Amino acid sequence: MKSTYQPKYPCKCCFIPEIVVKELKKEGYDIEMPNVNMDKSIRMRRQSLMLMDRALLAPGTSARHIFDSKNTGSTRFKLVREEGGAAIADVDANAAYDNGGLVREYFKTVLNWNSIDNNSLDLVFNIHYMSKYNNAFWDGEQMTFGDGDGVNFQNFVRALDVTGHELTHGIVQYTANLEYKGQSGALNEHFADVFGSAVKQWAAKETEKTANWLMGEICMMGKFKGKAIRSMKAPADAAVVLSAQPDHMKKIFKGTADNGGVHINSGIPNYAFYLVSMDITTEKAAKLWFAALQLLKPTSKFTDLYKALTKAAKKLVADKTLPSTTQTSVDKAFRKVGIKK
């Protein structure tokens, strides 16, 4: 199916949320904060993208374009590798190229989705962004990766799950286009984690039983209490994650920080996805979640995700894509996290 959805709420979706960085600074970690002026300029660029009629743009070829920002705040600064080009001396450029190819292949072969927009949109990666930049983000049009400060975090582009996460934000933009605030924003982050984890398992030939279900663990260098940025298996375990997330609706964050808890509350549906995967396999759960994503709307909430999964499950069970026990697994998981009563 060709996507015709016009992006209305593109987000600058960072892998490490600002609220977590603030918490770590309070604990005594010397971690650089994102540049506020940079964030404002990105928001202005996103606004211009929202006004763009993408129907007038020439279709892409799903090609990868790797740019080196040369530690500046500029994107598309110096083109260093293109689709079909040989590997170069820069290992991060090659990592961007290879990981981008794996994510593209996963969505094409497993989920029958062509690039970000299902219409061969080219994949643009910016590496070596700014100096010691501790993050990676999708800005509504392209992926950008920092090198990390070399003390707390390292090269985000080398983590396949980070690349999968950021590319999925683009796919969400072209499907449900989930508004980046409150529960819809938490679902945006949730889907990015779902497919970041799924593609990592797929590429490593892991199963739901052998996978560690950690997100971004290879980016972490510091002596943190946790082992990874997030965990889908144990989102609330402070001994595992950088900052604990709720794993049940009783613990849901209701404040205004983090755009209403977009990175915080994603732990609740993340845990539900893990539970369903353990029942029907990650590959089958990912197919169910991707079908449900295409049924959601920009303002969808957690209960809407459950309804969409129920509708998608009925169809996918009927055509024998998913096992007959799928709905039971979904019901059990969503009761476990408090979304279904």
Image: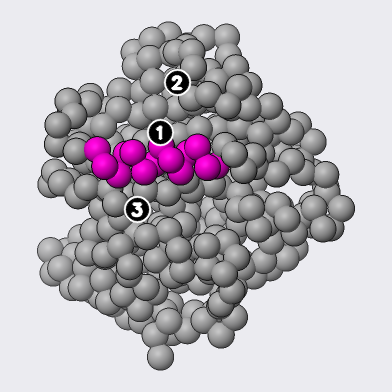
Q: Is residue 327 left or right of residue 43?
A: left
Type of amino acid at the residue the image marks with label 2: Arg
The residue shown at (32%, 49%) is: 173
Q: Which mark is residue 76?
A: 2
Quadrant (top left, top right, bottom left, bottom right) of the C terminus: bottom left
- Kindly identify which residue carries mark 3: 9
Residue stretch in magenta:
39-52
Residue furthest to the right: 28
Check disc 2 and report its element: helix, strand or loop.
Answer: loop
The residue shown at (54%, 46%) is: 14
Check disc 3 and report its element: helix, strand or loop.
Answer: loop
Dot placed on the residue nearer the N-terminal end, 2 or 3: 3
CA–CA distance in space, label 1 to label 3: 15 Å
Dot placed on the residue nearer the N-terminal end, 2 or 1: 2
In magenta segment, residue 14: no
Residue 44 location, x and y as percent?
Answer: 43, 40
Residue 188 against residue 43 in the figure, above or below: below
Dot placed on the residue nearer the N-terminal end, 1 or 3: 3
- Kindly identify which residue carries mark 1: 142
Residue 129 against residue 249 in the figure, above or below: above
Labels 2 & 3 near each other (Cβ < 8 A): no
Residue 34 location, x and y as percent?
Answer: 65, 42
In magenta segment, residue 47: yes
Type of amino acid at the residue the image marks with label 3: Tyr
Q: Is residue 309 left or right of residue 35?
A: left
Residue 110 location, x and y as percent?
Answer: 28, 45
Q: Main secondary structure of the magenta part?
A: helix
Labels 2 & 1 near each other (Cβ < 8 A): yes
Q: Is residue 176 left or right of residue 69?
A: left
Q: Which mark is residue 289?
A: none
In this view, the residue in front, 196 or 36, is 36
Mark 2 is surrounded, within 10 Å at the Cα level, by few (under 14), some (14 to 19) or many (20 or more) other residues, namely: some
